[in-house]
Image: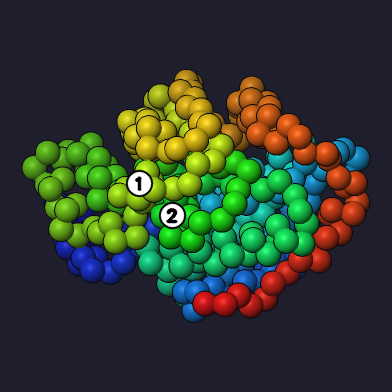
Amino acid sequence: MGLIVILFFTQGCANTAFFAPSKAQNLNPDIRWIESGSGNRIAHLWIPAEEDIQHRGFVVHFHGNSGHMEQTQEKVDWLAKHGYDVMVFDYSGFGHSTGSVGDKSAYLDAISILKHIEELQTNTQLPTFTVATSTGGNIFLRALADNPINLDGIIIDSSFTSYVDEAKFVLDKGMFGELYSWVAHFVMRDNYAAKEIVATLPEMQSLVIHCESDNIVPIASGEEIYQQLAGNKDFWRLDSCNHARAMTNAFPDNQKRIVNWLEQATPLFEAADPSTVSFQVANTNLPTLSK
């Protein structure tokens, strides 16, 4: 019952109970900064594509509700070996990013990242993809609906679209959960969730993946996202994996399938000279974005 007390105390606090950020111990010298519409400074890192292979584009990762970018980049950093520049970042209150965690600040951070992506597209003219993991899918989809940009493809991994529904699912699983899961409707909010707007997103190539044995976010949540998305889309039901782990090095077969999907998403793209593209991306650091 202690959880109920905690949840009541967090009512109206921007869903802060939903987030479990970590602070990075050491400042990575390669970290760059973006001024977010949240009023905070957002830390981000570029993982450049390996130079001895064809360059195929860049990928931006929206991580989940815990840790920080250098802990969660394992979901996408391996794409550098396949010709993709990879950008990872932290929401407000995560890692070295300033400010406090919350659904609104994360939403505003995501919009600022989308604006940053548009600047990168102008400078590089490269195929652009996003990968959104778990809570990151909820944050990303809502931001994209409110601030649409052109993307060559999106990958949604182990995600959901309602903070309220996800909190209820987790509470339901606890001891006597059926007695108090209703609390989620009073202490959580969906003001910055994607549930009501996924169907309004423009058509784009999308891939939704979800582990069948996910006991944190039910696969039904992934199926719902897939059904609502418009355009050319795929849904992969994956086995023998836990929540948000399917894209890590523990699952090389999944990684191969991801690479194939990315390549098929831009079949007409003529791979650029990697040294030129890496230079362009490495020197694209926009310290300030309009709020």
Q: Is residue 106 above or below residue 74?
A: below
The x and y percentages for residue 215 are: 35, 32
Residue in front for this viewpoint, 249 or 230: 230
Residue at the farthest left position: 179
Residue at the (91%, 40%) spot, across then down? 52
Q: Earlier in the sequence, mark 1 or mark 2?
A: 2
Label 1, residues with CA under 10 Å away: few <14, some 14-19, many ≥20? many
Which three-letter amino acid code belongs to the residue tagged 1? Thr
* The quarter of the displayed image where residue 114 is located: bottom right
The x and y percentages for residue 26 are: 66, 66
Circle 2 SS class: helix
Q: Which mark, by number, is residue 161?
A: 1
Q: Is residue 123 above or below residue 268?
A: below
Which three-letter amino acid code belongs to the residue tagged 2? Ala
Q: Is residue 287 left or right of residue 273?
A: left
Q: How many marks?
A: 2
Let me know if residue 8 appears in the view: yes
The x and y percentages for residue 81 are: 78, 38
The x and y percentages for residue 14 are: 31, 67
Residue at the (37%, 62%) spot, across then down? 103
Circle 1 SS class: loop
* The quarter of the displayed image where residue 31 is located: bottom right
Residue bearing the label numbered 2 = 145
Residue in front for this viewpoint, 30 or 231: 231
Q: Nearer the viewer, mark 1 or mark 2?
A: 2
